[in-house]
Image (tube, grey):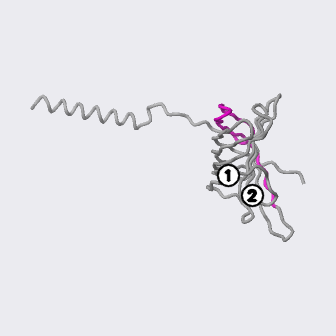
Amino acid sequence: MIYKLPFRIIIFGLSIVALLMFSSGSMVKAKVPSIDEGQFLLSAYGVANQDICGSATFSQKINEDRRGHESSQVWLRFDFSTTANHNSIEIVLSNSKIKDIEVGRSYKFDNRSQLYADFDGIYGFADIATIDELPFFAERGTLTILAVEGNLIKGAINAEFKNASKGKIVFQGSFNANEYILPK
């Protein structure tokens, strides 16, 4: 009995030390890439398997119909063009009930292949010349607005885009879009 007690105490003490080492943060942690203002970082899966990054901008306008009803449209644009090819993803948030973007809300993509003048919802298309000359349209997924700070919108996207000839691309990632003031 006398020899077993110190052995148990030593094992208990080593367990406490190991627990403190692991919980104190001395282990290497995975780094989440930070995204600069006016930039985006997306992973593409499907007909294109790569990480893409580039400039992210948004513009907002209030439309008024013939009856005086106002609706808001926010256009997000992710541009990753090269000198040889034009590549971009554009997303339109349209709502006739509110004028401001709702922080914390996840907008669900509708299966639309064209943009109508007056609609409530979200519409997305990708023009990626390096893959196909036909555009890709958002079929399903979400765009989440995480923060609106002055002239900056922060958010995340997880959406599936399809086109008529090449299949689908899933885009997942984050953005910090700067406001682009539309000319009047």
Mark 1: few/some/many CA within 10 Å (<14, 14-19, 20+): many
Label 2: which secondary element: strand
Task: Please provide percent x and percent y for residue 76.
Answer: 75, 48
The answer to whether the residue labelled 2 contacts the one labelled 1, judged by CB atoms less than 8 Å apart, is no
- Find residue 37 and report its image quarter: top right
Mark 1 lies on residue: 109
Residue identifier under label 2: 94
In x, y percent, where is residue 16?
30, 36
Q: Residues within 10 Å of mark 2 (few under 14, many from 20)?
A: many
Q: Is residue 147 left or right of residue 70?
A: left
Q: Is residue 146 left or right of residue 126?
A: left
Q: Identify whether 83 is placed above or below 177.
A: above
Q: Which residues are magenta?
A: 36-62
The picture places residue 68, in percent across and down from the top left corner, at 84, 70
Q: Residue at x 70, y 51 (%)?
A: 111
Q: Nearer the viewer, mark 2 or mark 1?
A: 1
